[in-house]
Image (spheres, rainbow, N blue to C red):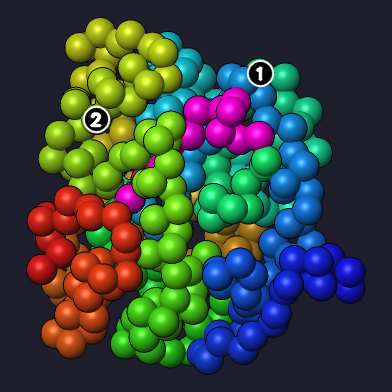
Amino acid sequence: KDHEKKFNIEWIDVPFTKHKIFTCNNFYLPEFLAKSLEKFKQFQVRQDDVWIVSFPKSGTTWVQELVYLIENECDFKKATQDSIENRSPFFDYPSPGLKHIENIKTKRIIKTHLPHSFLPDEIEKKAKLIYIVRNPKDVTVSYFHFTNLSTQAQFTGNFYDFTKLFIEGKVPYGPWWNHVDDYVTKKDVHVIYYEDLHTKPFEVIKKLSKYLGKDLSDDEIKSIIEWCSFDKMKNNPAVNYEWYKDLGLYKKNGHFFRKGTVGDWLNYFAVDDSQKIDHIVENKLKTKLDFNYGIS
Ligand code: A3P
């Protein structure tokens, strides 16, 4: 296993799950990444690529749909004609695979959860890079539910067990603080806060479209906000991932579009775990983030 040696891969057992995880470069990564690390680095980035990057459960799908509409002149009809994963492919997963993404002829909107050090070498010189940050406590809640929705993880622990793993960084793509730090400190990265999308969507979308070099009218921005509301997206079969149930990837009870709110962590967190995450944000995270909404 040469690539495992080359990348210093070490396999670890994570309690409560059948998911295999390996450590590499200060991160805990899911098994399906192990064979592709070298290919990720060598991937040919294009000048007009848009990369949407996030720690899982930070609002990636929401931003994918926003970016798709910004890039495609608010063509809502076109946005219903293909699934979000076809319109904005997931870089990390072996399917559809890097070859498929390489062969896309039109402008690419690529989704990834990879930490910065695992991205293609030329990424910053070339592509546009959007990074989404969400309150880590809400990320924990969302990630816990997502792990239970998935038929793959077979997580047997409860919320407290999951939170403990999150705090130790031992969830796929963890630790959260390393992930965030590596992106928000890069100067050409356009950072979006999930919470801002809730409280000031107009401003966020205006800035985002500027970053993408698009000048949208106020009415266009308003129609995008409406189209991308939680309820609309939850009922939109092109984005709501209900098709994963037919594929056997999600359980029948539960939805990818779960709740979509800020501060749901208040309904879940024990006081001491909440304080541990405050401690992470204040001490382990090198960047000062503006988390006065809902963090404590
Ligand atoms: P919850 O589990 O808290 O509901 P990702 O796309 O990165 O996997 O993130 C999924 C999370 O974003 C889920 O959070 C989901 O409900 C939320 N989300 C997705 N679209 C949203 C929208 N239009 N408005 C608000 N939240 C949204």
Q: Position of residue 262 (x, y in %)?
A: 18, 56
Q: Which residue has dot 1 on it? A: 106
Identify the residue at image location x=41%, y=13%.
Answer: 213
Residue 242 located within the stretch drawn in magenta: no
Which mark, by number, is residue 204?
A: 2
Report if the CB atoms under discs 2 and 1 are less than 8 Å apart. no
Which mark, by number, is residue 147?
A: none
The type of residue carrying mark 1 is Thr
In the image, the residue with mark 2 has its CB under 8 Å from the nearest atom of ligand 1: no
Q: Can you tell which quarter of the image residue 61 is in?
A: top left
Q: Position of residue 11 (x, y in %)?
A: 69, 82
Crowding around mark 1 (Cα neighbors within 10 Å: few <14, some 14 to 19, many 20+) is few
The type of residue carrying mark 2 is Val
User: How many marks on residues?
Assistant: 2
Q: Can you tell which quarter of the image residue 168 is in?
A: bottom left
Identify the residue at image location x=62%, y=20%.
Answer: 47
